[in-house]
Image (cartoon, rainbow, N blue to C red):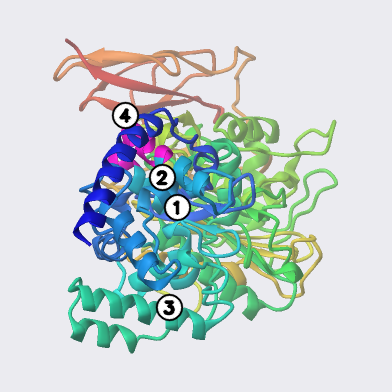
Amino acid sequence: MRRLLASAFLVALIGGSFAAISLASVPAPSPGRANSLSTLVLDRDGRLLRPFAAADGAWRLPVARSDVDPRFLKLLLAYEDKRFFAHRGVDPIAVLRAAGQAVRAGGGVSGGSTLTMQVVRLLTPDRSRNLARKWREAGAALALERALGKEGVLDLYLRLAPYGGNLEGVRAASLAFFGKEPARLSTAEAALLVAIPQSPEARRPDRDRAASRKARDRVLARLAEAGAISSAEADHAREEPVPDGRRPFPTLAAHAAEDAARRAGAGGVMRLTIRRDLQRELEALARDRARALGPGLSVAILAVEHATGAIEASVGSADYFDASRAGGLDQTRAVRSPGSALKPFIYALAFENGIAAPETLIEDRPVRFGDYAPRNFDQAFHGTVSAGQALALSLNIPAVALLDAVGPARFVARLKGAGAGVFLPAGEAPGLAVALGGVGVRLIDLATLYAGLARGGGAVPLTDDPMALSEPSAPGRRLADPIAARQVADALLKSPPPEAALGGRLAFKTGTSYGYRDAWAVGFDGRRVIAVWAGRPDGASSAGLVGREAAAPILFDAFARTGEPLLALPPMPEAAPLTLAELPAPLQRFRANGAPPPVLGARETAPLAVAYPPDGARVEIEEGAELALKAAGGVSPFRWLVDGRPLPPDRRREAFWPVAGAGFSRVTVMDATGATASASIRLERGS
C-alpha cells in the first residue's frame, strides 16, 4: 500500500505539472447570456416596480452579493464549495476526495466541481459528460477566476443559477417563489434556493412540492451535519411550508413602466419618480372604486409633486389585466372632454386682467351669447353671486360670461402656453363652449394646469424621469400671476366637499362631460396635486356618472391614502382680500358681455395699456423707494391697483407706488370706461 501510494503521488506530481501547463492555456468563457439581462423599472428609492423578460425570454434580473441575504451566501458555499475562497477555480482536495470515493464505490459518488466550474458550465453550451470536457472546464475555471476574481464569479452564479423554466438567478427565483427580494430570506427559503439549481426542473416547487421539500430538507440536514447551522435551526426550517406555486412578478405602474422600458432599452435599468407604496395604494383604490361604479367602468389617477413636477403615482386604469375594462389602455393619456374642470383658469385670467375680482358681483341668470344659451348643471339659477362663489359652486353662466370677456382664443392660448395639451377639431376655432368642456384634454394636462395653479401660477412640465425634474424655485411657464392663482385657490377651498368629507382643507374642482361620459376631480394642497378620471374607456355614456359623486370621493380618499396630512397652502401675498366696498366701482359688478357703461363726453382714444413698467419686466428697487407707474391710452380719470388692492385715488395717468419689497406683483390700471390693462412684473433689490 505504501509503494502504491508513493507511485500515485509521483504520477500525480508529474501529471500535475503537465496539467498546469495545459490548463493555463484555456481561455475564460465569454459571459454570453450573462450580459443579456431583464429590463428593470424602479421607483425613486430604487425599489422594483416592474421587470421585463430578457431578449431570449428568460427572467434574468441583475443581482450582486450586496443584494442577497448573507445567510443564503453562507449556506450556498457551505453546501456547494466550502473551500471556495481557498482554491483558484479548481479544488485539488475535492477532486482527490471524489476520485477516492469513486474507487471505493466502483463509480461516481460525489463530484469534485467547484462553484467556479459550475459557472463555467452555465456559460458554455457544451453539455457532454467526459474527461476531455472536465479538463476544459477546469482550465476555463482557472481562467475565469483570473479574469473576474472570487467576487465576480460569485456574482455570475447568483445571476445565472437555473431555477426551472425561464427563471435564472437567485433574484428572479426569490421573487417568483417567495414574492420578495432576496435581501431577507429565512433559513428554509435560503436552503430551497440552494437545492433547486442541482436539478431545477425536478425540484421546482410549482411542479413538485414534495420533491422540492425533500431536496430542501436534504440540504438542511447536510448543513447541520457540517456545523453550518444548528440542529435546532434545521428542525425549525423543516417545519416551514414550501411555496405552492410561482407568483407573478410585480407590475406596479404598468403603463408608465412600459414607456420607461422603451426608454431604457433591452437590459437597461430605469428609475422613475414614482413612490412605490403610494402607487400600490392608489392602484388598489382605483380597482376597488371601479368595481363599485359598475361593469365596464375604469378609473385613472395621477399624483404629482407640484413644486418639481415629479409624478409620484400614475394609475392608467383600474386593473391592467382586466380586459373588460380595457385595462391595457393608459387613460391618463386619453383625450376627453373635461366638463367644468377648466373653469378655474378662466377666473384666473379674468382676475389677472382686472376684468373681475373674487368679490365682484356677477349675475347667474338666463342669458344668450348669440345662439349659445348655457344653463347650470342643476338647471337652476342663483341670481347675484360673487365671482368667488360662482367658481366654488361651479356655476356655468358666470364662467361663460367671463370667458366671453377674456376671449376663448386667448384663454386656450394661455393653457397651451402653460404646457397643457388642448385639442380642438381640425380647423375649428375656440368658442364659448370651451368653458363647459367643449375641448379635449388629457388627465395629465389637467394635472399640469392644477400643479401650476398650486405653485403660484408658474406651470412646470410633469415627468417621471428624475433627471428631468424642475427646480422647486423655477418660475415655470406662465399660467396666471401669483395673486390671481392664489385667489382662485382660495375659491376652490370653498367648493362643497363630497358626502362625509371635511371641506375647507383641499382646493378642488370637479367636472362632468356632456352625456355623462367622463367624471373628473382634481385637487391640491401645499404639497401635491391629485387628478382623477372615471368613465368608460370606449367613451360611452354612463347614466349618473357625475364628477362630484363619482370622482370627488376617489380624490379625497386618494389624499387620505398618501399617509401624510394635508399641507396648508402658503399664505396670501396680501394680508387680507378686498371687500366689495373696497373695490373700485367698475370692479364691484361685472357687466355681461364685457360692455362698459357709457361715459358722457368721452372721445375715441387708443386702447388702454400700462406703459411703465412693461409686462414681464424686472425692476430694481431700493429700500423705501416709490415706483413710478404710467398708463397709455384710455379715458381719464384712472384708478391704479397693485395685486388687486387700489392705490390712493389720485386719478391721474401717472401714479407712484410705495414698494414693500422684492417679489412678483401685478399692476392694473382702470379707466373711466371700465377698461383695464395689467402688467406682471418682478421686483428685485438693487445691488
Type of the residue with mark 2: His
Which numbered disc flags the more N-terminal residue, 3 or 1?
Answer: 3
Magenta region includes residue 420: no
- What's the mark number on residue 306? 2
Main SS category, magenta section: helix
Mark 3 crowd level (few <14, some 14–19, many ≥20, 10 Å Cα): many
Alpha carbon separation for disc pair 3 and 4: 87 Å
- Give the residue pinned by disc 1: 529
- What's the mark number on residue 215? 3
- The residue lying at 19 percent from left, 12 percent from top is 686
Which numbered disc flags the more N-terminal residue, 2 or 3?
Answer: 3
Please state if 572 lies on the left or on the right of 673 as rendered. left
In-front residue for pair 505/646:
505
Q: Is residue 463 visible?
A: no
In-front residue for pair 91/241:
91
Q: Which residues are magenta?
A: 139-152
SS label for mark 3: helix
- Give the residue pinned by disc 4: 647
Mark 2 crowd level (few <14, some 14–19, many ≥20, 10 Å Cα): many
Please state if 593 lies on the left or on the right of 221 as rendered. right
Alpha carbon separation for disc pair 3 and 1: 52 Å
**Viewer-side label of 2, 3:** 3
